[in-house]
Image (cartoon, grey):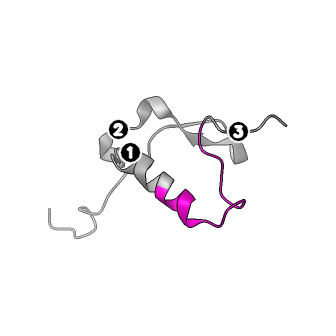
Amino acid sequence: MTDPLDKATSTAPATLGEGCLSRYDPAELTAENGTEFDGAAGLWRELQRAQAPGEGLEEEGEQEDK
């Protein structure tokens, strides 16, 4: 590998949809894409407690009927 630009390559995972509805295909995401984050649930709860009451996002299962 003599070209320094050869070592800095990456590819995005497959996507579903088009335009503003485009999103990564969950079936194609792997730990190599950075999708593993064991502390995600704890971080979510911590961020919700840090927000002022009444301004936070609702936790899963606590959504009000609208």
Q: Quadrant of residue 22?
A: top right
Which residue appears farthest toward the right when viewing the image?
66
Q: How many marks?
A: 3
Sequence-wise first label, 2 or 1 = 2
Q: Along the horizontal axis of the image, is 43 left or right of 47?
A: left
Residues shaded magenta: 46-60
Percent coordinates x, y for residue 37 in the rendering = 35, 48
Mark 1 surroundings within 10 Å by alpha-carbon count, few (fewer than 14), some (14 through 19), many (20 or more): few
Residue at mark 1: 35
Query: Marks 2/1: CA distance?
Result: 6 Å
> Which residue is located at x 56 percent, y 57 percent?
48
Amino acid at circle 3: Gln
Percent coordinates x, y for residue 24 in the rendering = 53, 40
Which residue appears farthest toward the front when viewing the image?
53
Q: Quadrant of residue 9?
A: bottom left
Secondary structure, mark 2, is loop
Query: Marks 2/3: CA distance?
Result: 30 Å
Of tags 3 and 1, the one toward the viewer is 3
| 28 falls in the magenta region | no
Sequence-wise first label, 2 or 3 = 2
Which residue appears farthest toward the left when viewing the image?
1
| Chief SS of the magenta region | loop
Sequence-wise first label, 3 or 1 = 1
Split into 4 quadrants, where in the image is the C terminus?
top right
> Which residue is located at x 71 percent, y 47 percent?
20
Of tags 2 and 3, the one toward the viewer is 3
| 4 relative to 9, above or below | below
Residue at mark 2: 30
Percent coordinates x, y for residue 10 in the rendering = 35, 54
Residue at mark 3: 63
